[in-house]
Image (tube, helix red, strand yellow):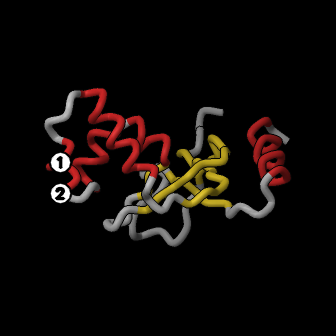
């Protein structure tokens, strides 16, 4: 068994009640003409995820890293209007506080990347 397989088994044994979700890179899915696709497990970790109203899935880690773009796209307009002119450090604090209020779902997130055909 490879390293990522051992890591996934360890995470599952430590968190048996968490759902396992696939986080699939867009390059993996070949198009509408395919019924199934094949990719490689690149990472496995416990993450908080949120699926946006338009169907995009974010990890909490990415939302906090790209907090400005995330707030621009998903925060209520009245929130963005209220925090827009705050100094940078206060803006960051308020947006990250708002991010924490979203209905994040803790899961074992398995990241799927395109097959490495050079191996």
Up-down: is 72 above or below 2?
below
Callout 1 touching callout 2 (CB < 8 Å) = yes
Residue at x 14%, y 49% (from the top left corner): 81
Up-down: is 104 above or below 89?
below
Residue at x 29%, y 32% (from the top left corner): 90
Residue 89 drawn at (x, y percent): 30, 27
Up-down: is 46 above or below 65?
below
In which quarter of the view is residue 6 placed? top right
Secondary structure, mark 2, is: helix
Which residue in the protein does label 2 denote?
Answer: 78
Residue 14 drawn at (x, y percent): 83, 50
Residue 108 drawn at (x, y percent): 67, 54
In which quarter of the view is residue 2 placed? top right
Camera-side residue of 47 and 42: 47
Camera-side residue of 13 and 40: 13
Residue 40 drawn at (x, y percent): 63, 47
User: How busy is the neighbourhood of tag 1: few (under 14 within 10 Å), some, or many (20 plus)?
Assistant: few
Secondary structure, mark 1, is: helix
The span from disc 1 to disc 2 (Cα, nearest Å) is 6 Å
Camera-side residue of 13 and 36: 13
Up-down: is 97 above or below 74?
above
Residue at x 51%, y 72% (from the top left corner): 35
In which quarter of the view is residue 21 placed? bottom right
Disc marking residue 82? 1
């Amino acid at each position: 068994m490879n390293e990522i397989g051992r890591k996934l088994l360890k995470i599952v044994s430590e968190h048996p009640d968490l759902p396992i979700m696939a986080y699939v890179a867009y390059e993996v899915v070949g198009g509408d003409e395919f019924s199934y696709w094949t990719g490689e497990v690149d990472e496995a970790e416990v993450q908080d995820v949120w699926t946006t109203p338009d169907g995009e899935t974010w990890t909490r880690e990415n939302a906090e890293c790209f907090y400005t773009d995330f707030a621009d796209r998903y925060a209520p307009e009245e929130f963005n209007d209220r925090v827009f002119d705050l100094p940078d450090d206060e803006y960051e604090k308020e947006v990250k506080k708002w991010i924490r209020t979203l209905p994040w779902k803790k899961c074992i997130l398995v990241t799927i990347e395109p097959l490495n055909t050079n191996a």
